Image (spheres, rainbow, N blue to C red):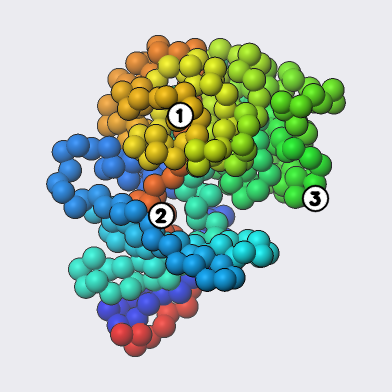
Amino acid sequence: MSVDDHSILVLSGSEVDQILDRMDPDVLLASQQDVFSAFSDSSNDEGTIQTPHRNTLTSPESFALFMPSRVANAGGMACKIVSIPSSGIGGLPASTVVLNEKTGKVQAIVNARKLTSVRNAAGSALFVKNFPGPRPLRNLIIYGSGAQARSHATVIIKVNPSITNCTIIGRRESDRLTALVTDLAKSFPDVKIRSAVSVYPDPNPDFDIDIVRKADLIVCNTPSLQPLFHVSHVAPQTRIVSIGSYKPTMHELDQETIQRAGLIVCDSGDACLREAGELQLAKTKRDQIVEIGEVVNNPTLVKKVEASGDIVLYKSVGIGIQDVAIAHLVFQEALNADLGTIVKDYD
């Protein structure tokens, strides 16, 4: 399938799901690795990476976010549009408009409901790939039961076949938590998938704290206003991912966790310092941060990060060029698979 200069390709949510289900996770990680590498490469010409601040439009019933970005070596230009209905019903509608860099014309409109969580998960998996740790990754725990948790569990288990146990932790029993565990168990029959409920810092005698103590990788996917666990329960050399907190008022991690980590790995140092509540409360400075793109470009930084603390932390708030990369990747995969609807003579 091909799209000429006068046509556009439209990809529905179900078509995007088909593409993601069949996509090689290593291809997904490589795509995100390319944009992180470009983002942190100080030798890039001006304009190679463009991530202007998002714009917002409001109405009485909803508000919409417009997030344009450009990354020259991984897809060019795109703009993601996310709507947030005041009712909260039906999730968050999202679409990404993919542009042809040479003509400036729209090439594709891609349903992006799932793409944000998948690109975040790919970034987290890339961190784990670069910081594998001294012991095999067997025990994974994930805080949260929404789309971010689902994507993180799926991508991380796919690229880490050593995982034998995965615990999904929620703040309460819910149909969503049960459904997630059931779906993951079907997808990964060789992995023991279970759920648990933790209301930390409130006492919960039914929660087995050994779940945290034995974890090799802890992934936090919640907009929590208070820490999800105490750092004293975390074993040395554990890897921790925090992607749920993106406002100064949100704190998935306590200050002791930040201190134990030493140097902190981030997707964007400036964005994390501006948005991540944990780092602001800890008064983290820019020289205490190493970007994942810097690690990709200079692998010797791995030992420097590991030597700076006895746990390794990855903090991500998401950057727009990740949307460009994954939307362009899905667009190309759709063309290869003859998926989507071509609108002819659009322009």
Find residue 315 and name its label.
Answer: none
Q: Is residue 46 left or right of residue 238?
A: left
Identify residue for label 2.
Answer: 323
Q: Could you tell me which secondary element the residue under label 3 belongs to?
A: helix
Residue 119 appears in the rendering: yes
Can you give x and y, in whole percent of width and height, for residue 75 in the image? Answer: 31, 57
Q: How many marks?
A: 3
Identify residue for label 3.
Answer: 175
Which of 130 and 199 lies nearest the eye of the viewer? 199
The first of marks 2 and 1 along the sequence is 1
Residue 299 appears in the rendering: no
Indicate the quadrant containing the N terminus: top left, top right, bottom left or bottom right. bottom left
Can you give x and y, in whole percent of width and height, for residue 86 in the image? Answer: 62, 64
User: What is the three-letter code of the residue carrying label 1?
Assistant: Leu
Residue drawn at point x = 37 percent, y = 77 percent: 8
The first of marks 2 and 3 along the sequence is 3
Which of 112 and 156 lies nearest the eye of the viewer? 112
User: What is the three-letter code of the residue carrying label 2?
Assistant: Asp
Q: Between marks 2 and 3, how big is the CA–CA gap? A: 30 Å
Residue drawn at point x = 50 percent, y = 42 percent: 246
In this view, 9 is above or below 148? below
Residue drawn at point x = 56 percent, y = 12 percent: 236
Q: Between marks 1 and 3, how big is the CA–CA gap? A: 33 Å
User: What is the three-letter code of the residue carrying label 3?
Assistant: Asp
Q: Could you tell me which secondary element the residue under label 2 belongs to?
A: helix
Q: Could you tell me which secondary element the residue under label 1 belongs to?
A: helix
Find residue 279 and name its label.
Answer: 1
